[in-house]
Image (cartoon, rainbow, N blue to C red):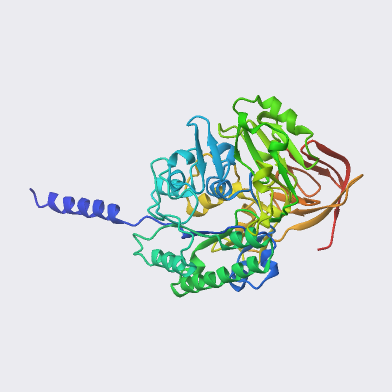
Amino acid sequence: MTPRVLPLLVALLVTACSSQSAPEARPAPLLLISIDGLRHDYIDLTDTPALDRLIAGGLKADGLQQVFPSKTFPTHYSLVTGRHPGSHGVVGNNMWDPARDSRFRLSDREAVSDGYWYQGGEPIWVTAQRQGLSAATYFWPGSEARIHRVRPDHWKPYAGDTPHAERIEQLLAWFDLPIAERPDLFTLYFHAVDSAGHDDGPASLEALTALSEIDGHLGRLLDGLEARGLLGRTHILLVSDHGMAEIDHDRYLFLDDYLDLSGLIVSDAGPAAQIWAIETPAEDIVAALRNAHPRLRVWAREDIPERYQFGPHARVPDVLAEADPGWMIHRRRAERAQRSPNDPRGMHGWDPAFRDMHGVFLAHGPTFAAGSRAPTVRSVDLYALMSHLLGIDPAEHQGSLRPFKPYFDAAPLTPAHRSLRCDGAAPMQVELAPNHLSLKHGLHGYVLLREFGDDSAARFAAPGLKLEWRGEQASLKIDEQRFEDCRLEPTAH
């Protein structure tokens, strides 16, 4: 080898080694926290210094509108996939799968950890790991299963009695891993507020005490991140999967008062019942229930309101029956003939537009301006947001990043408030942000995305919903209701 060639080879070798060992830029860590059953207004009803700390330093939405049905497993899976249950297939806490002729129950550990049930969507930890990032999940529904042949790098099988302090310690231990081994995405889950809400009722002393206890542990988590120099460099999204509404033993509807249950399968019940036509034709089931009770609504699969986005997955039932908020559907009258001390006092699962079903959304970290406020946001949009914060390409989803984009600026942003007055209807409240708005109509609240326009003329829409205005003149559509003679007026807030 000539003297001239040797230095050239050495230089090439050094360059090649340097390019292989140079660390790639990594995103700011992302921590997704769920407090199950935390209704949108609970934070205002008790002292929550840790949550107040996140709110002061970041973005707080007026609420988080979930998907239908507003149950724990469907909503949590929609949060991390950006898909509605009618698309991802986790259509209830209890489900029937006609292709497999089998049931999914929360109490069935084998089913909960079987990836078959989750194939209709791609959760954020799968998206992240497929693109070279690392994920650690602590009790997130679906994370125990191998989905699309991927399981989180670090995960915990669900054990509801795990002390909250132990969960915080494990999370901080994951943050303490060497930088090359440290996860980029973390999830954390608490169920105590939901349990107390079911047992003792929404906004009960027990539910608020559970929230205060969790808040104390979150305070230690924030202190731990701050001591490590990570609090200001970590994105934290705190959410809840649904709210909670009061129920009573006297507000039950019984399917066997109207149907012979031997010819069908009821895969889930409660605020809504999912009914499968096995021997009884679906049209007969609908006919039997259509005028059965003034507090009950029923649809054949193809007639379910567009706004629910409950289809087209094969696990969506032949017939859907839904009770009014605060009312419950049970299979058999004989099974609930007597009151019991164990009767729940709180429940969820109704129309996600029902305000008591709305949860919480807080965002804190380097992307979000301190002191920002937003109208209610949609849970299906969080997958797009998390993909953006992690710098990865999202899989196919049904959400949008647009509602969050205005909040990426350095200056804090707050919504404008309007009053929508339509002839023959009570005034409605509108909270208007640059790319979306929330509309409060009686006990319900809706989220619509901007399609075009500005403050003087615009159209906002969502499945089954449309609000248009030009100047002060406006029109509104909610499902089959139409309000044509409306005025949009500024209001003080």
Does 114 sit above or below residue 48? Answer: above
* Image location (x, y in percent) of residue 201: 68, 61
The answer to whether residue 463 of the structure is visible from this angle is no
Given residues 58 and 410, the one toward you in this image is 58
Q: Residue furthest right?
A: 423
- Residue 59: x and y in percent read 63, 62
Q: Is residue 303 left or right of residue 194?
A: right
Q: Is residue 65 visible?
A: yes
Quadrant hosting residue 372: bottom right
Number of numbered labels in the structure image = 0
**Image x and y of residue 351, in percent:** 70, 45
Q: In the image, what residue occupies the spot 43% across and 50% down?
A: 144
Question: Closest to the observer: 180 or 31?
Answer: 31
Give the residue at the far left of this rendering.
Answer: 1
From the top left corner, tell me how far across and down residue 303 is, in percent.
70, 30
Residue in the foreground of this view, choosing between 96 and 218: 96
Instruction: From the viewer's perspective, tell me whether residue 309 is left or right of residue 181.
Output: right
Q: Residue at x 38, y 67 (%)?
A: 176
- Picture quadrant of residue 363: bottom right
